[in-house]
Amino acid sequence: MKTIASENTADNAKAIQDSPFKGFFKRLIFAFVIGMAFITPGLSGGVIAAAAGIYEPSVNAIVTIHKNFRKSFFYLLPIGIGGVTGLLVFSRLLEQILASAEATVIFVFLGLVLGSLPAFIKESNSKDGFKALYLIPTACTFALVMVIEKVLSRPEFHQTTSELTLPMYIVCGIIMSLGMIIPGISSSFILMAMGIYNGLLSTINSWVDNVFGFIKGGFRGIGSFLSSFDYPSIFALGLSFVITSVLAIKLVDILFKRFHGIAYYSVLGFLIGSMVAAFPGFRDGVGIAIDILAFALAVVVGFFGMKLNERVKD
């Protein structure tokens, strides 16, 4: 008799067992949106991935890449390209528009997430259906987000300067990893609540500018290019991110395989809590009309985007 874990493993493996390029552009587009959501305060790219049906197969591909490298690699390739591209492209734009239209940007992404909720709940109930018991972890994780938001809003947890120290880069790496791997957790929101977000976003954009400047310059001045980076900070950020990811992803893989419904409804609590915490409030005058219109349009796009995703099978 098959166990639940083995059935779930088979389901996830099925998504990557066909042609490695099947569904390539679908995953590329979703990953681009996920990359943008990853750096938007209050939002979780993992939730979009889960609603799109690529979260569990992606985790499974990472965990089993040593067993089936080629298929796992080509399944993850468009996700990596799309995610990094969305993050890098949107990071520069986000830094500029947050200063003038932060509320509208958050309303847009809140609308996208809300529009994807029906697909997310459908995926949550896909294995064993809905059980009232699932609302308990939802309430627990929602309460946890509210407590964390309250704690992080205290002055002692708030970075008062935009310049990040080496320990803060380690903290950033850990938080970014958890936000990427665990759906419903918004690493950007946590970093913003701690006063770290703007400084980190500015630093990452400066690194990206250095790379593009070097490319546009015809790869001249390699010495000055290499000396423009803060290598201890990059190392601290990257190492803490990788170590946390390695430790967390296996745990997440086990939880979603063995406790599918509980895991997804726990994520739902994280998601609702993050949306409540990220809600920017309503502006006065024409601003409120712009925000509501942007939110409504985003809900429609998110809903029908997921409907289209259901029709476009991998």
Image: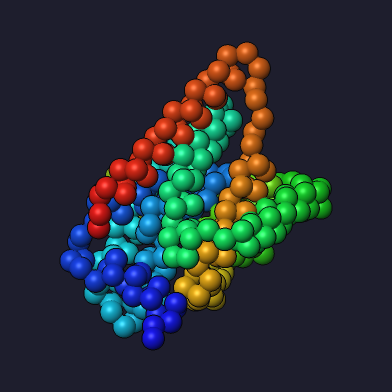
Is residue 14 visible to us here? yes
Quadrant location of residue 8? bottom left
Residue 297 drawn at (x, y percent) = 44, 28
Quadrant location of residue 308? top left
Residue 279 drawn at (x, y percent) = 64, 37
Residue drawn at 39 percent across, 83 percent down: 2
Residue drawn at 51 percent across, 40 percent down: 114
Depth order, front residue of 203/39? 39
Left or right of 225 on screen, residue 238: right
Q: Residue furthest bottom?
A: 1
Residue drawn at 53 percent across, 58 percent down: 130
Colour scheme of the picture: rainbow
Q: How many discs mark residues in the rendered view?
A: 0
Q: Quadrant of the N terminus?
A: bottom left
Is 42 placed above or below 103 here?
Answer: below
Is residue 173 visible to us here? no
Residue drawn at 55 percent across, 18 percent down: 289
Depth order, front residue of 34/264? 264
Is 275 placed above or below 133 here?
Answer: above
